[in-house]
Amino acid sequence: MAALIEVSNLKKDYPMGSAGVFNALKGIDLKVEKGEFVAIMGASGSGKSTLLHLLGCLDTPTSGSYLLEGTPVHTLSSDQLAELRNKKIGFIFQSFYLLPRANALENVELPLIYAKIPPSERRRKAMDVISFLQLENHAHHLPNQLSGGQRQQIAIARALVNKPSLIMADEPTGNLDSLTSQRIMELLKKLNEMGNTLILVTHEADIAAYAKRLIKIKDGRIISDELMKKN
Amino acid sequence: MASAQIKKEEIFGLWGTFVELVKVSLRAIMASKMRSFLTVLGIIIGVLAVVTVLSIIQGVFASFFKEFETMGADTMFIRPNYEMFKSHVEGIRRLKMTYDDALYVKENVPDVKDVAPFLMSTDQISYRGKKDSTQIIGTTESYITVNNLGLDEGRFISNVDVATRRKVCIIGVDIIDKLALPPQCVGEEIQIGRGTYTIIGVQEKKGGSFGQSQDDIIFIPLTTGIQQYGQTVANQVFMVVQVKDARRMDDSVDKISTALRRKHGLKFGQEDDFRIFTVEQVRKIIKQFTSISTMVVTAIVSITLIVGGIGIMNIMLVSVTERTREIGIRMAVGAKRKHILYQFLLESVTLSTLGGVIGLVSGWGLAHFIVFILRKSVSETFPPAYVPIWVVFLSLIFAALTGAVFGVYPAYKASRLDPIEALRYE
């Protein structure tokens, strides 16, 4: 069976005006199996964000190939990418990225709207995830009525609601205090233990330590890729 | 079973997406009520102006048409050509049209079926101490048939009444109220000017027209009128002529014109001292009036809607910029370009349609208020404002279209955003 993610010789260049091009990724080869928990570490400017965007189907590579569950992502149109993000990927961001005017429940429902799920079913699915995270009491609160940790949990619920094949977390604890960070990382770990595949991008070693596999990136190349023993 | 399921989902896909987008739009609009209101102010004022103007014009139109409703295709109206002179007063002084002219036309033009000559005056009226004033029409027995009038009670003027200058009258229904007449008023005697007249009939209710009730009127025999109102009025006898064959109207107009010129001793090349109006001409005048007012209204609509539309486009562009992050989030969780496009397009359409509704309601209110003021100050019988259903639909459709046209560019701009750039936007 094909790997969940199969990336070969992935390159991404950004035009820099008269200065030519910036080679953000200089040829990445990567395989991620279903059920893995991968942390991608690197300093800022190392290309880890670019890699996250490519793996998250938010962007297309300049060259190279990316197969997500066998789908050649590098050949898709922007609408096909949108559909793929909707069905197969759940995002967790540093700044939560909740819609400020929608309550928690509506935020969680958002991906289901674009998946054309009828309202009643949508509500039920969203509530299921919210109760799994024990946030029922906050379902009708607006994001600004929630604490940072609660907001991130709602964002996680939104990432989970469409049962994605892959969860991408971009510095998920960057805006949280250390205690809350721990709770969020424990939650991600638990999600992984339940069978979800997670890719975590961070620059903090103690956050990366929650993952089972650590990939280090520098100057657009993978410099190390190892399984972590302690878990 | 399975195919039915799919179909159901497809239908939901269309309708559900639409409902979803309207909800999102309303939320965005309500989130900044003041700004939304100011944004659509242009549309509101545009629709308000159009609805106000149109509903007052339409009200006048409706009553105008009613007036000519009774004028059949086989009739024409002839009066002195006042336009020959600078002022109407001078025209009245120098032009003559008499009962004789009417009799001459009837006797000398074979095409003519009947002629109803009439004079008009205004006079004081009273009944048992109750006083008022009204319009007096002096005419002959022909008037009722030529003008298609109906009677509620009694009879109209007869040729005997005219021949013997009898002091009898037919009253419009308003007179009953004005003079507090008993319900069975035929046979009662009322004062008209200095004369005492016996009521012989009551005219069927006709309703208002052009700010004047057509029921606030009294008919008396033409000859009695000439006797009572004297030479000036007697020289301004108008006529309604009924021809035998409406299909040969133009020909008949020529013949009557020739007869009147002969009667008035006009030489070749001299201008007619009378004017003939046929239903066709009245229709033409109405048509001209309609097309002019349509042009004016179209001009107001276009200008205000363009101005309003630019306002909407401006704010929608600001809104797209402000909500770049939101667009990024929606794209990240799976919104396609078309979803973003529809969302912002629908938002501007919803906004402008709401503006249209507000404009419509306030225009309706303003028109009724203006009519109320006009009735207090100008004439009690000013026709009511009337908003035809096509004005309602047209203004809402135009408002929505403005939102659509001027919302396309901002919505397109939103839909072309790059998800990563949009997410990064601070």
Image (cartoon, helix red, strand yellow):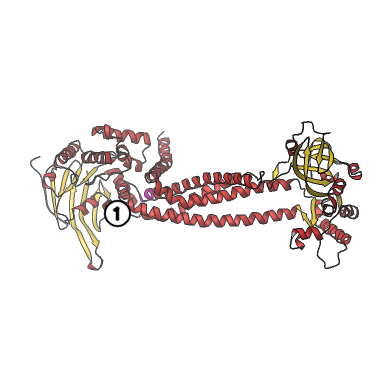
Kind of residue indicated by mark 1 = Thr
When the figure is inspected, residue B325 is found, relative to residue A151, above or below; the finding is below
When the figure is inspected, residue B57 is found, relative to residue A128, above or below; the finding is below
Q: Position of residue B132 (x, y in %)?
A: 74, 41
The segment highlighted magenta reads B335-340
Quarter of the image with the N terminus of chain B is: top left
* Residue closer to the observer: A10 or B250: B250
Q: Position of residue B248 (x, y in %)?
A: 82, 54
Residue A149 covered by magenta stretch: no
Mark 1 — residue? A75
What is the tally of numbered marks visible in this picture? 1
Q: Is residue B370 visible?
A: yes
Chain letter of disc 1 in the image? A
- Left or right: residue B183 versus residue B338 is right
- Left or right: residue B306 versus residue B226 is left
When the figure is inspected, residue A110 is found, relative to residue A8, above or below; the finding is above
For image coordinates 55% across by 46% down, the residue present is: B366
* Residue closer to the observer: A101 or B2: A101
